[in-house]
Image (spheres, rainbow, N blue to C red):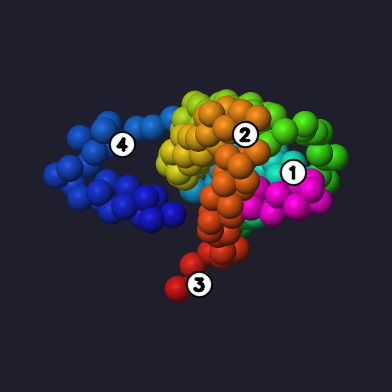
Amino acid sequence: MRVYHWIKTVIAIPALSLAAASALTFSTAGYGATDTAMLRKLPPDVTTAINQQIKDELNGAQEYLSLASNFYAINLNGFGSWYTAQYVEELNHARMMMFFLTDKDETPAIDGIDVPTITFTTPLDAASKSLALEEIQTERINKLHDLATAMNSRDAATFLLFFITEQVQEEANFKNQVDKLTLAGDDRAALLALDKDAGLRIIPPFFMPPPAP
Ligand SMILES: [Fe+2]
């Protein structure tokens, strides 16, 4: 909305009107409307794709909650806590996307969550499969950003940049786990030390949007 008003203001200045009109021409591709007021709305395809990503984030959260519960069940509570932190992170990703949609006057579609699929035999197996899951999430986020860019949805594309950076961190976290657990091998003392170390990971607070002005 602010951009729309700014455009109107610039075009209203007679001396700049011709140059501004040509410089400020932009595409409405993806919006399904030529009315520039529609530009503050998200392209429907982008809204649908973000709703799908919310579901994918919640599915990821459910996978990590399942892994955490399995670690707690075998008294590797440090890893249980580590995967609990990951569970909350994925919930927060979904919540950030949910609030982005509500800020854009959309009603997020909170769909059902799939049954977790990851099973594991060792902590290394769990970390390796989780890393593979994060690599899939990275690909999804990248495609979502590509879609927002192709649809000229600058607000969505900019919002999604956070998640592109976040995925670098997510993959690095799991790669770190994989590397250390590989190094530990069958050494049980080393495994218990890594479990203790994993328990130091801070569980993030529940994401809440800033209060409305
Ligand atoms: Fe995520």
Question: Circle 2 is placed at which residue position?
Answer: 187
Percent x, y of residue 99: 59, 57
Q: Residue at x 39, y 50 (%)?
A: 4
Instruction: Name the magenta segment's main secondary structure.
Output: helix
Q: Which mark is residue 211?
A: 3
Going from the N terminus, do you reach mark 2 or mark 4 first?
4
Q: Residue at x 57, y 27 (%)?
A: 182
Tell me: is circle 4 under 8 Å from ligand 1. no
How many residues crowd mark 1 within 10 Å: few (<14), some (14–19), many (20+)? many
Going from the N terminus, do you reach mark 3 or mark 1 first?
1
Q: Is residue 134 magenta?
A: no
Tell me: is circle 1 under 8 Å from ligand 1. no
Instruction: State which mark lies toward you, 3 or 1.
Output: 1
Secondary structure type for disc 2: loop
Q: Which mark is residue 24?
A: 4
Q: Are marks 3 and 2 in contact (CB under 8 Å)?
A: no
Q: Are marks 3 and 1 in contact (CB under 8 Å)?
A: no
Going from the N terminus, do you reach mark 2 or mark 1 first?
1
Quadrant location of the C terminus? Answer: bottom left
Instruction: State which mark lies toward you, 3 or 4.
Output: 3
Instruction: State which mark lies toward you, 3 or 2.
Output: 2
* Distance Cα–Cα, label 3 vs label 1: 34 Å
* Distance Cα–Cα, label 4 vs label 1: 51 Å
How many residues crowd mark 4 within 10 Å: few (<14), some (14–19), many (20+)? few
Residue at the limit of the structure toward the left, as seen here: 15
Secondary structure type for disc 3: loop
The residue range painted magenta reads 68-80
